Image (cartoon, coloured by chain):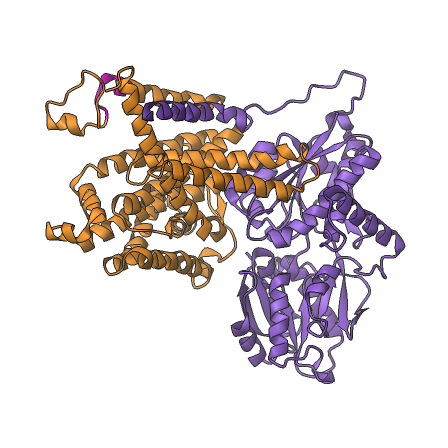
Chain colours: A purple, B orange
């Protein structure tokens, strides 16, 4: 009996080992060359999405991804893809594990025109040399833009750097600062790559005339208290607190601040300090917070939450996408909606592929073409969902402007019109300050 | 261990020989030939998977020495690997040392740290020792990220260069394969032989009953600390290889979850055997690759499900396979392989 089981087992293991090359894709697929004189569109083109679906930062990276795939699915359904060429999305669950990111990259790089990765800092850290070698343009929404790597590589696009947001908000704060003394600033940062960017901000902020009185990192462990950090921050008596906490942490922190008797808002109006948050809220985040807790907070808004600023077309498109998401995935209305940023990311990538195809033709469209003639040629592109997008090889940040919004008394106000954000890492580099 | 039919041991050296018969020698020669030739026809992707697997295999082999042979639980292997990676990277970046000096230096640095955290193993056992090594995991990463931030770059990636030897730069998956496979073979050979030495037998004695071992004259403190030291050396070497393989890495690469996976690979493969970590790493890596492919492959088949749902199903299946496997064969793949070999040698006879 044992013998038979063992033989079966041995045979199964041997078969698995023999099947390994087949299972993980031994030979890369090659596209047959187009007949001379005739432009042949491919049956489909691929793009890859690296996202943490089952790992530690799922809550942060997945909502954007859902919006992203919804957009592509809708585009394929209604318009047959880009210029009639369907887009095949290869969704890779990295579980925030660099081994999977590298293996996935090597596996799919020959099958796709471009890749996107959300909140996958190790992906950019470890593979940016490969992007250059393989001529693979990658779109990074958060936590991995080329600002990570100033001067830019030229192959990573998108993404906003939280340092730049703080720089922009600091400029606004200084413009409105009335007192003779320097304003005091505290940094309350989430302990994840995108959250830690502002660790290098102090020289920039001090150059603007601010005094950095505290810097605290809050470990990214989900729903845990940050009371220690908050006590040290409040003890330093700042006028402004800049924070990059992830939403789940922020909800706890706002609760704890309220418990400490802290009131958000300018000191001149009876507040303890003004709290600036690097990411915008959407209605689902708002639903998870007590209204009295977020009273007085200022946020950087990637898109108009109520679309007052961006107008009707954006709102209609957002509604359409949300309905499509619910239809495609059979999601009840009351469930969380996908992130708006995901829709706009899809639109930007589609524009890049379209521009590259126009330049070199579908039959000669490669990842290199998308990197050279796609993204860098996007100028003043309006998605209707986020500020105007413009890329260049020298500046791959894409978005330069953000809205700052104040939540007060159950309503919201825009603090300023869209203004160009500073490029803090560039400033640090030019002034000989360490930033990496 | 049963020998092939007609093979008898007449000298002690024969009893202890790793390769006992001509067939064994022929098989090992064939294996090396396959390892030399096969990479030339494999895709870059498969070589990537194999390279990563081989580096992990070294770390798991080390873990097997302290846990499988010496019975001391260790949940901090990834952190010891981090010590090796950062030591190697910093020595190369700051002192311009060659990879060939950085590699052993990384092993030695990890060994020193391993000794430090191994010392409590004399006083604490079982779950308490697990907590000590758990603390090692978090303390080491914290020290790298915060107090040593100015040196290591903290949470930012530490960038290193590819290994070089006689003008050859190991910067492609193929070249790296030969380098990593060679070092893995050496480390495996050392691990296999270690277990057949006095030290190895001391480890097993301490694992089976440390009081009895002490009564027999084995220095428990020295034995346990030595096991941690060797285990950490392996982790350090694996870390150094990882650093120069990746050429940019952060502490994220050495998370607590990695340490857990190392333990999982060792258990699935079979603790207390040299073959176990090899089979365990191979098995888990294979499953991992299947899971990685599963989501993109199934999305068009199950359009009503999101990628996350499909991925969760894959992870569930992954866990289920491991659970079923451990229920079916708690002593791991190596034991099952041993049964298979024994049965094969007796076949077609039933005795």
User: Is residue A103 or residue A261 the one in the foreground?
Assistant: A261
| Residue positioned most to the right | A312
Q: How many marks?
A: 0
Q: Decide whether residue B21 is among the magenta residues.
A: yes
Q: Quadrant of the N terminus of chain A?
A: top left
Q: Percent position (x, y) of residue A71?
A: 76, 43
Query: Which image quarter: residue A8?
Result: top left
Residue A356: x and y in percent read: 76, 34
Q: What residue sits 78% from the left and 30% below the top?
A: A85
Q: Which residues are magenta?
A: B19-25
Query: In the visual, does B210 lie left or right of B57?
Result: left
Quadrant of res A306: bottom right
Tell me the quarter of the image containing the C terminus of chain A: bottom right
Q: Observer-nearest residue: B342 or B288?
A: B342
Q: Is residue B121 above or below residue B289?
A: below
Q: Nearer the viewer, residue B282 or A41?
A: B282
Q: Is residue A376 visible?
A: no
B8 left or right of B119?
left
Residue at far front of view: A1
Q: Position of residue A413 (x, y in %)?
A: 81, 69
């Amino acid at each position: 009996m044992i013998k038979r089981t063992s033989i079966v087992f041995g045979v199964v293991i041997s078969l698995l080992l023999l099947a390994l090359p087949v299972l993980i894709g031994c030979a890369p697929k090659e596209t047959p060359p187009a007949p001379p004189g005739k432009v042949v569109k491919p049956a489909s083109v691929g793009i890859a999405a690296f996202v943490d679906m089952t790992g530690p930062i799922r809550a942060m990276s997945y909502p954007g991804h859902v919006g992203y795939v919804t957009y592509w699915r809708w585009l394929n359904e209604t318009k047959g893809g880009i210029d009639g060429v369907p887009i095949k999305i290869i969704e890779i669950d990295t579980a925030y594990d660099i081994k999977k990111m590298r293996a996935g990259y090597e596996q799919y790089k020959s099958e796709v025109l471009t890749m996107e990765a959300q909140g996958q800092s190790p992906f950019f850290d470890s593979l940016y040399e490969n992007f250059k070698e393989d001529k693979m343009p990658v779109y990074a929404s958060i936590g991995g833009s080329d600002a990570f790597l100033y001067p830019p590589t030229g192959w990573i696009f998108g993404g906003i750097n939280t340092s730049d947001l703080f720089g922009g908000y600091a400029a606004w704060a200084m413009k409105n600062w009335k007192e003779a003394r320097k304003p005091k600033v505290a940094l309350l940062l989430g302990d994840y790559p995108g959250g830690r960017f502002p660790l290098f901000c102090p020289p920039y902020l001090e150059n603007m005339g601010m005094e950095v009185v505290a810097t605290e990192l809050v470990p990214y462990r989900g729903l845990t208290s940050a009371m220690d950090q908050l006590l040290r921050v409040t003890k330093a008596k700042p006028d402004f607190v800049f924070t990059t906490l992830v939403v789940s942490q922020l909800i706890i922190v706002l609760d704890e601040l309220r418990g400490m008797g802290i009131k958000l808002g300018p000191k001149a109006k009876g507040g303890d300090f003004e709290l600036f948050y690097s990411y915008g809220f959407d209605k689902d985040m708002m639903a998870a917070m007590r209204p009295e807790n977020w009273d007085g907070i200022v946020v950087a808004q990637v898109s108009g939450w109520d679309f007052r600023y961006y107008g009707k077309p954006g709102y209609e498109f957002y509604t359409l996408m949300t309905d499509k998401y619910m239809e495609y995935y059979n999601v009840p209305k009351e469930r969380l909606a996908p992130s708006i940023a995901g829709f706009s990311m899809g639109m930007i990538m589609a524009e890049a592929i379209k521009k590259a195809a126009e330049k070199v033709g579908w039959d000669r469209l490669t990842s290199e073409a998308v990197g050279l003639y796609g993204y860098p040629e996007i100028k003043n592109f309006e998605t209707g969902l986020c500020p105007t997008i413009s890329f260049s090889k020298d500046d791959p940040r894409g978005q330069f402007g953000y809205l700052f919004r104040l939540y007060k008394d159950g309503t919201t106000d825009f603090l300023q019109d869209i203004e160009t954000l500073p490029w803090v890492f560039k400033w640090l580099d030019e002034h000989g300050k360490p930033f990496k | 261990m049963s020998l092939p039919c007609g093979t008898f041991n007449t000298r002690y050296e024969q009893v202890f020989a790793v390769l006992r018969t001509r067939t064994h020698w022929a098989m090992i020669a064939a294996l090396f030939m396959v390892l030399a030739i096969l990479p030339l026809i494999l895709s870059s992707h498969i070589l990537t998977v194999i390279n990563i697997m081989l580096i992990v295999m070294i770390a798991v082999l080390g873990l097997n020495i302290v846990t499988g042979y010496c019975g001391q639980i260790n949940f901090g292997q990834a952190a010891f690997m981090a010590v090796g990676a950062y030591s190697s990277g910093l020595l190369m970046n700051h002192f311009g040392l060659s990879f060939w000096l950085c590699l052993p230096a990384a092993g030695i640095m990890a060994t020193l740290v391993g000794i430090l955290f191994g010392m409590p193993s004399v006083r604490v056992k079982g779950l308490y020792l697990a907590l000590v090594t758990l603390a090692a995991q978090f303390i080491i990463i914290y020290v790298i990220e915060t107090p040593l931030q100015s040196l290591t770059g903290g949470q930012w990636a530490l960038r290193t260069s590819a290994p070089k030897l006689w003008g050859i730069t190991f910067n492609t998956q193929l070249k790296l394969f030969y380098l990593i496979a060679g070092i893995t073979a050496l480390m495996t050979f050392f691990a296999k032989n270690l277990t057949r030495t006095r030290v190895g037998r001391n480890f097993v004695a301490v694992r089976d009953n440390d009081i009895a071992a002490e009564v027999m004259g084995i220095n428990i403190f020295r034995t346990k600390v030595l096991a941690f030291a060797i285990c950490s050396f392996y982790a350090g070497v694996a870390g150094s290889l990882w650093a120069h393989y990746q050429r940019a890495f952060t502490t994220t690469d050495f998370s607590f979850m990695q340490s857990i996976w190392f333990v999982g690979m060792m258990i699935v493969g079979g603790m207390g055997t040299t073959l176990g970590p090899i089979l365990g790493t191979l098995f888990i890596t294979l499953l991992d690759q299947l899971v990685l492919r599963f989501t993109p492959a199934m999305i068009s088949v199950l359009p009503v499900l999101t990628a996350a749902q499909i991925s969760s199903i894959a992870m569930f299946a992954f866990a289920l396979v491991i659970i079923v496997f451990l229920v079916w064969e708690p002593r791991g793949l190596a034991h099952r392989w041993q049964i298979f070999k024994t049965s094969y040698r007796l076949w077609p006879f039933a005795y």
